[in-house]
């Protein structure tokens, strides 16, 4: 019997894209940023997760700011780190979508930080930002995708 395993941010990103009709051809960067914990990042396009060498793509804990300062201690710090990550991923990948989730940082805090981050607006790529409001629901759809992806019943 086949056995599949995947992490939370991957399942959330895939599930959200399936739930919300984001095109398969879109390059989507999902960022899950729990309060006061290191974020996870997922890259999804053409119905595939991009994990890189040794599955290290998206390991935000290796970014200089998080290495130097550790996990953010306030919502404002979390939003600043989030926008810095978005700048890096926008430069490297120019995604169509950023799908963002947190277990406690208010969406409005992220929205304000994104609006205020000038570096995000210098780049000519015009991405869309979407927010996950039902993390568990997105993960469940992601689990269904994981189970069915190699079958004729793929989502």
Image (tube, helix red, strand yellow):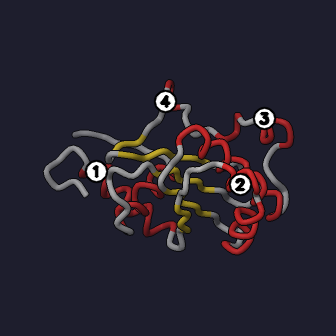
What is the C-alpha distance between the residues marked 4 and 3? 19 Å
Q: Nearer the viewer, mark 2 or mark 1?
A: 2
User: Mark 1 or mark 3, which is nearer the start of the sequence?
Assistant: 3
Q: Position of residue 71 (x, y in %)?
A: 79, 48
**Which residue is identified by label 4?**
52
What is the C-alpha distance between the residues marked 4 and 1? 21 Å
22 sits left or right of 82 in the view:
left
Q: Report helix, strand or loop for mark 4.
A: loop
**Which residue is identified by label 1?**
147
Who's the residue at 75% across and 60% down the image?
Answer: 79
Q: Position of residue 120 (x, y in %)?
A: 68, 53
Q: Nearer the viewer, mark 2 or mark 4?
A: 2
Evaluate if marks 4 and 1 touch, with contact meaning CB atoms under 8 Å apart.
no
103 sits left or right of 148 in the view:
right
**Which residue is identified by label 2?**
83
Q: Report helix, strand or loop for mark 3.
A: helix
Viewer-closest of 50 and 146: 50
Graded by Cα atoms within 10 Å as few (under 14), some (14 to 19) or many (20 or more), the crowding at tag 1 reads some
User: Mark 3 or mark 2, which is nearer the start of the sequence?
Assistant: 3
Who's the residue at 57% across and 47% down the image?
Answer: 41
What is the C-alpha distance between the residues marked 2 and 3? 14 Å
**Which residue is identified by label 3?**
64
Graded by Cα atoms within 10 Å as few (under 14), some (14 to 19) or many (20 or more), the crowding at tag 3 reads few
Who's the residue at 47% across and 51% down the image?
Answer: 28
């Amino acid at each position: 019997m086949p056995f599949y395993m995947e992490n939370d941010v991957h399942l959330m990103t895939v599930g959200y894209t399936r739930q919300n009709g984001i095109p398969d051809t879109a390059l989507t960067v999902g960022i899950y940023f729990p309060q006061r914990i290191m974020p996870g990042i997922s890259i999804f396009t053409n119905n595939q997760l991009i994990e890189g060498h040794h599955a290290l793509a998206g390991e935000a804990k290796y970014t200089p700011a998080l290495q130097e300062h550790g996990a953010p201690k306030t919502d404002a710090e979390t939003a600043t780190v989030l926008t810095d990550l978005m700048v890096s991923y926008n430069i490297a990948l120019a995604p169509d979508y950023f799908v963002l989730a947190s277990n406690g940082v208010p969406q409005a805090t992220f929205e304000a930080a994104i609006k205020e981050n000038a570096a995000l607006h210098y780049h000519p790529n015009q991405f869309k930002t979407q927010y996950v409001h039902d993390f568990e629901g997105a993960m469940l759809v992601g689990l269904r995708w994981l189970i069915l992806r190699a079958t004729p019943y793929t989502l």
